[in-house]
Image: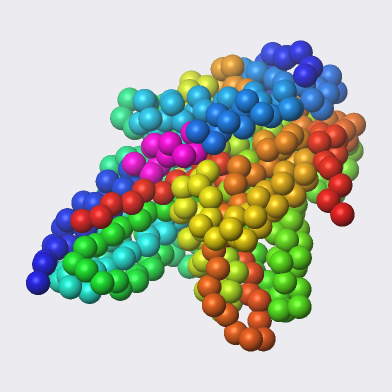
Amino acid sequence: METEQRVNLPLTPQKVRELKAGTPVRLFGEILTARDAAHQKMIQALSRGEQLPVTLKNALIYYTGPCPAREGEVIGAAGPTTSSRMDTYTPRLLAEGLLGMMGKGDRSDTVIEAMKKYGAVYLAAPGGAGALLAGKITRAKAVAYHELGPEAIFRLEVADFPAMVAIDVFGNNLYRVEREKYARSNE
Amino acid sequence: MREISVELITDTVAELCREANLCLGDDMLTSIKEAVSKEESPLGRSFLECLYENAVLARRKELALCQDTGMVVVFVELGQDLRITGGDFNAAISEGVRRGYRENYFRRSVVKDPFLRENTGDNTPPVIYVRVVPGDRLQLTIMPKGFGSENKGRVAMLTPAQGKEGVKKFVLETVSQAAASSCPPVIVGVGVGGTMEYAALLAKKALLRPVGTKHQRPDLRELEEELLAAVNDLGIGPQGLGGRWTALAVQVEVYPTHIAGLPCAVNLSCHCLRHKTKII
């Protein structure tokens, strides 16, 4: 495995180019959450020519819908959801200056082409480790689309949040490379 | 005639929802531990260790194992010599889900309508299956089903000529397409026989068998082992980032079927396979 890198947020176009597929990272700083319904709302707003309720320039979107927080806690379980459901919306958001995305699972070729074009990175967070990841979130506040409940856009402050660079700005894709390495012929 | 009140049913459902979402079963913990010791991929190993740590943390801090606390599937075995008193049976189960999810801060993941998509706000309604059985007991099984893996299930109406080879091909295609999205290492539930919808139900019920136990029928045990080896040769691995353990188990259930058909369904569960049962 590559050496782990500390990544301070927000991302910069320069930093994104340094993050190579296969590098484990620890995130520190601010990220936004959005999943299916919030993506749909943002795309609808953009198509009507409206401003988005949050700025996506240099942002990192984490695909998650967290559990509500218990009294006195920051947040409930907050692991990644399947990223490919966002594929249809992603290129338009990259055009708004989004630099990073984090979720679980592979992305479409169209998204990967758009990531190369706009210079964005895709991180894999450990899927199904929601309780563990909740402990890496130090602040959480719903900032837009509150009516969507768990699907609202939250601004999160994270510290030491573990992830893996899965697809880099050059289109190198850990999902495809690693799977081939371990595959055995079944025919 | 033995009587059970709807209040007892509600209390039991609420408690089972809590336990299922906080405490991963011992069968899963053992199975994940075994995978850690055998995984060849360093990345895969560290991910599997992280899942174990997640399960320990969830129980200790009373945090849901996964933020997708699922749509609740309830399997009921209702003794025919039992009488339910004090209200509506289905409403009592729904109330148990409502309470279990509210009191434990679990995510509400259910929408009122598949097209209008407004959240019901209390994770109801559940999906309820009732089977009437001899006796005067009530067995309740709660399975919160996350949709990362649920979305990747499939049904095929195969022909008798396609036989076991057809089933094997379909299972492999399904797991291969699901890849990382279904949160591997997965448990693969396979239902063969019955009718179209019954095969799907069998596939889901196959997930209830404790992981690591073998099928009673030798030929099906052999089929399960063959399927597991083939699935794990796909290379998808833990978290879909390559490795030996794409599935922890393949579990098959069968039922009589029509002379013209071979219905086959695959229901996948992520590594966070949650279900709890209580008999009252």
Looking at the rendering, which quadrant does residue A21 occupy? top right
Where in the figure is residue A142, as x and y percent of width and height?
A: 48, 36
The reply, left or right, for residue A13 in relation to residue B30 is right
Residue B4 seen from this side: yes
Q: Is residue B129 above or below residue B51?
A: below
Quadrant where the image shows the C terminus of chain B: bottom left
Q: Is residue B20 magenta?
A: yes
The reply, left or right, for residue B155 in relation to residue B19 is right
Residue A102 seen from this side: no
Q: Residue at x 17, y 62 (%)?
A: B6
Q: Is residue A52 above or below residue B255?
A: above
Q: Residue at x 24, y 62 (%)?
A: B138
Range of the magenta residues? B19-29
Residue closer to the observer: B260 or B144? B260
Where in the figure is residue A33, as x and y percent of width and height?
A: 58, 37
Q: Is residue A82 magenta?
A: no
Residue closer to the observer: A79 or B201? B201
Where in the figure is residue B225, as x and y percent of width and height?
A: 65, 50
